[in-house]
Image (tube, rainbow, N blue to C red):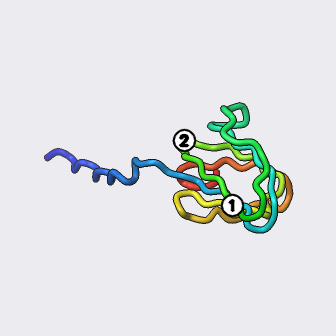
Amino acid sequence: MPPPKPAKKHAASRGPVFTSISATRGRCWLLVRAGGPNGTVLYEGTLEQGQAKRFPISARLWVRMGNPDALDITVAGKAIGGLPTFPANVVLTRAGAA
């Protein structure tokens, strides 16, 4: 008897995943690159308090944040916690922060 076939993934799991970066507690300078620190620049600028940017994640995004304490970041609608309070980098994947 052959082994059972793995369950098929739902179409939604293969669909696009987005991250939202919101400046909710102040302004923050951002540099967002596709893939890694040498990837294509998707955004560079300052988010003023109340502004947000949304990016699709195909594999991963590399994000440099000047004031991460001012930000709220979500991936696929799920909040990313544990951001540092000082300038730092974070890698975002379809599953969250890496």
**Residue name at image x 61 percent, y 56 percent:** 20
**Residue name at image x 67 percent, y 47 percent:** 91
Q: Is residue 59 positioned above or below 9 on the image?
A: above
Q: Is residue 53 positioned above or below 26 on the image?
A: above
Cα–Cα span, label 1 and label 2:
21 Å
Residue 74 drawn at (x, y percent): 61, 60
Pointer 2: residues within 10 angstroms few (<14), some, or many (20+)? Answer: few
Pointer 1: residues within 10 angstroms few (<14), some, or many (20+)? Answer: many
Q: Is residue 30 left or right of residue 94?
A: right
Q: Which residue is mark 1?
A: 22
The amino acid type of the residue labelled 2 equals: Ala
28 or 73: nearer the viewer: 28
Q: Which mark is residue 59?
A: 2
8 or 92: nearer the viewer: 92
State the image quarter where residue 22 is shown: bottom right
> What kind of element bears circle 1?
strand
Circle 1 or circle 2, nearest the eye:
1
Residue 94 drawn at (x, y percent): 53, 50
Which circle's residue, 1 or 2, is located before the other in the chain?
A: 1
